[in-house]
Image: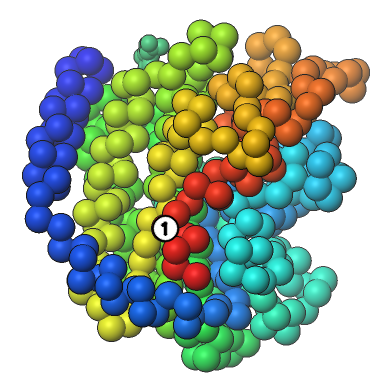
Amino acid sequence: MMDFVLRLLFSLLLLISLFSGRGSAGGVYNHHHQQLRHRFRPTKLFVFGDSYADTGNILFPISPGMQFPYGITFPGKPIGRFSDGRVLTDFAARHVGLKSPIPFSVRNRVGLRRFKETGVNFAFGGTGVFDTEYPLPNMTTQIDFFQHLRQGDSILTNTDAQSSVALVSASGNDYSFYFAMNTSRQGLKPFIISVVNQIMVNLKRIGGLGVKKIAVTGLGPLGCFPVFTAPSSYKQCNESINSLVQFHNFLLKEGVKKLNQETKHSSKVFIVDVYGAFMSIIQGRKRYNNGEFKTPLKPCCYGVGSGFSCGSVDGEGKQMFVLCEDRKAAFFWDSVHPTQQGWAAAFAAFKSFRNHF
Ligand SMILES: *[C@@H]1O[C@H](CO)[C@@H](O)[C@H](O)[C@H]1NC(C)=O
Ligand SMILES: *[C@@H]1O[C@H](CO)[C@@H](O)[C@H](O)[C@H]1NC(C)=O
Ligand SMILES: *[C@@H]1O[C@H](CO)[C@@H](O)[C@H](O)[C@H]1NC(C)=O
């Protein structure tokens, strides 16, 4: 049955790509953007989403991001980032000339006024657009937090919003949750459609709150992630999973195109092509700083024995994971997250993001 659905999706994909190859309405927009390109200098970054973007919102000791060896490269200890060091948000902030925004969770410690400096990071690892891991806030709730700072606390003014950029990271937790809860493959396609529809609702809301530019991530090639390539000793991507990913990414692209036509004069959304960037690195088409990732599918840190993962310890406190020697030579940090070096390489390949600022 799985096969049938996959084949169906795949033929749909082919069909769709035949159509979308023609008639590019994009030219007009591109021209428009050339003119705007060097004028927009955001003063704040607002971040929504999951572990690709979280820089320390989950401070529970049981969160992987709070366990050794997470954070070992930067800042040198685990503080809630899901990597050995910097993540997507940090690279995005640096690219637009801002300090990485402060995690929303530390507001009581630092005070709300600090959010006026370089923005706020509302992203929580493990979350999706729908509910995943209770009690972590889904993306709707993250946007509620933002709305409250805008309209309730009035900490963030219209000017703050208009001179800001938003980064929205939706990397697939909705799907892990779906597979964990519901093995029905028939329900998968409608579910993908509903996930993308909800992403569109969220993007519209963020634009409606005054943010002029919004970067949204597409899905990465999940079928190439260590969690799925472990059975082949990190040698082979799972193509059927990747074709589902491409279906999601196709719907996202169509949705964003439509949204941009509707909101021509207020906000502009663009997609960060995580799939293309990760694939170019994994397939060795893209080198970074003259270096390369020698075994790009193999994670730097992984559990030994079943049930253990990067950062796991057993009942006696013994480490139940392997940590690689050269973190800079690994693209993947753990079963689903890139290393800091991996993010640096991927960010260098995010043309859409780089071209917008
Ligand atoms: C997000 O979480 C809130 C609070 O738990 C819930 O009421 C809402 O239905 C959720 N939204 C979505 C789209 O799942
Ligand atoms: C699983 O998905 C099917 C098809 O969409 C749906 O009918 C069913 O209610 C779902 N089951 C659960 C437990 O969510
Ligand atoms: C790919 O993943 C699917 C879903 O998890 C699984 O059923 C299938 O066996 C995998 N294919 C390969 C070639 O590993």
**Is the residue marked 1 within 8 Å of ligand 1, measured from its CB?**
no
| SS of the residue under disc 1 | helix
In front here: 177 or 211?
211
Give the residue at x 30% y 31%. 244
Horizontal side, residue 138 vs residue 325: left or right:
left
Please, is residue 196 above or below residue 325 in the view?
below
Q: Residue 330 is drawn in which quadrant? A: top right
Quadrant hosting residue 11 = top left
Q: Is residue 349 visible?
A: yes
**Measuring 56% from the left and 86% from the top, which residue is drawn there?**
160
Tell me which colouring the rendered structure shows.
Answer: rainbow
Front residue of 80/21: it is: 21
Badge 1 local density, few (<14 within 10 Å), some, or many (20+)?
few
Residue drawn 83% across the image and 39% down it: 72
**Percent position of residue 191, x then y:** 28, 40
Residue plotted at (83% across, 50% down): 75
Examine the rendered structure and indicate whether residue 88 appears above or below residue 236: below
Q: Amino acid at mark 1?
A: Ser
Residue 136 versus residue 144 in the image, above or below: above
Q: Quadrant of residue 140?
A: bottom left
Left or right side of 226 for 222: left
Query: In x, y percent, where is residue 62?
Result: 75, 39
Q: Is residue 292 left or right of residue 10?
A: right
Q: Nearer the viewer, residue 311 or 133?
A: 311
Would you name the residue on which mark 1 appears?
352
Residue 221 appears at what percent x and percent y? 42, 32
* Residue 308 x/y as whole percent: 70, 19
Q: Residue furthest front?
A: 290
Q: Quadrant of the N terminus?
A: top left
Residue 66: in sight, yes or no?
no
* Number of marks drawn: 1
